[in-house]
Amino acid sequence: MKNFRSLLALPYFTSLVTVALLVVLFALGSVAYDGFFAVQVVLNLLIDNAFLLAIGIGMTFVILSGGIDLSVGSVLALTTMISAYLLQSWHWHPLVVIVCVLALGGLFGAAMGVLIHFFKLQPFIVTLAGMFLARGLCYLISINSITIDDPLYVAMSQTRLEFGGAFISPSVVIAVLMLLLAIYIAHYTRFGRAVYAIGGNEQSALLMGLPVGRTKVAIYAFSGFCAALAGVLFSFYMLSGYGLHAQGTELDAIAAVVIGGTLLTGGYGYVAGTLTGVLILGVIQTLIAFDGTLSSWWTKIVIGVLLFVFCLAQRLMSAGAAKAVDAGGVGAAVKPSVQAA
């Protein structure tokens, strides 16, 4: 029992559980279904979920800071609608369209960050309002789906980057590059350290002289940018803009971040863990698809159970760390936010 408590006190306990779960799911799939462990099946997880990885990266920073962003799915949909409208109705150059929607996503997130910090509003309420606003703006543009036939978007959708008999899409490359950039920002920059400090204890961060206000605005701006980037990738994937795109994606992103080992209370987590969380969600969907007899709603059921389990694990981890400190084991239970930063 003592060893189990010591294990719970480890700050990277949930990250270890996540990796172990991913390995187990892959092992079960490879035993139960022929061809499940093929390289292309694994790469298809990234192809199908590149947009979710991009949106999850921004959500990771928000949750690390102790906040939440419910608007990301609607910003994704709004991005697809604006992109489709500018391309099809105004015939803008696709690169100009991409730059514009990325900038709009960042500005949208920054505006929410200003309301949250300077007006002392709860992130849940502000981003919920942002979710309704962005989704409503989609229908001001059009209530119908707008097909995208721009040559660049079609090429990005159909291009296969082949290697070793398998292939990935350009969207996967973009999402992975964004992940690598986010890992560097989170763990090797002053901004990243400030994010962890704010999530650990905002008042302590203020007393240390950290630019809390500027950092929080930047966090939500980054989340909005990532949501817009996810919208661009989703446009490549679907070749359309639609107000109903990505409904519930904000919840999938939160699930991926939490399952990836980031504490909902903030202050601890790894950006790379979000990739593991996204892959777990993808594996669950793939297992259900390979089975062929189960409803797609089983995906939501399994994800819900996993969330309960990981939230419980996080709670036990926090309790284990507190008991270790009470017992004098300070060295073994250093505050997660300090270790992660």
Image (cartoon, rainbow, N blue to C red):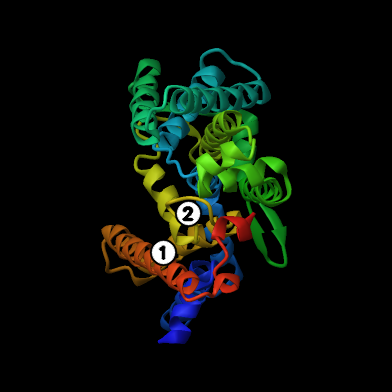
Q: Which amino acid does label 1 sit on?
A: Gln
Label 2 element class: helix
Q: Position of residue 274 (x, y in %)?
A: 53, 56
Sequence-wise, the earlier of marks 2 and 1 is 2
- Give the image location of residue 42, x and y in percent: 56, 66
Q: Please state, as top left, top right, bottom left or bottom right, where the N terminus lies in the image.
A: bottom left
Q: Determine the CA span between mark 2 and mark 1.
A: 13 Å
Q: In the structure shown, which secondary structural element does the residue marked by tag 1 occupy?
A: helix
Mark 2 or 1: in front is: 1
Badge 2 density bin: few <14, some 14–19, many ≥20, Cα 10 Å: many
Residue 185 falls left or right of residue 47: right
Q: Are marks 2 and 1 in contact (CB under 8 Å)?
A: no
Q: Locate the C terminus by quadrant.
A: bottom right
Residue located 51% across and 41% down the image: 202
Query: In the drawing, what numbered circle is on residue 257?
Result: 2
Residue 141 located left or right of residue 151: left
Residue at the image point whose x is 35% and y is 33% from the top:
244
- Closer to the camera in the image, 337 or 124: 337
Q: Residue at x 40, y 40 (%)?
A: 246
* Nearer to the camera, 326 or 190: 326
Residue found at the far top of this picture: 90
| Towards the viewer: 153 or 233 | 233
Q: Is residue 243 above or below residue 333?
A: above
> What residue does disc 1 label?
314
Q: Which amino acid does label 2 sit on?
A: Val
Q: Front-most of 101 and 335?
A: 335
Q: In this view, does 312 lie above or below 182?
A: below
Residue 34 visible in image? no
Q: Can residue 101 be seen in this view?
A: yes
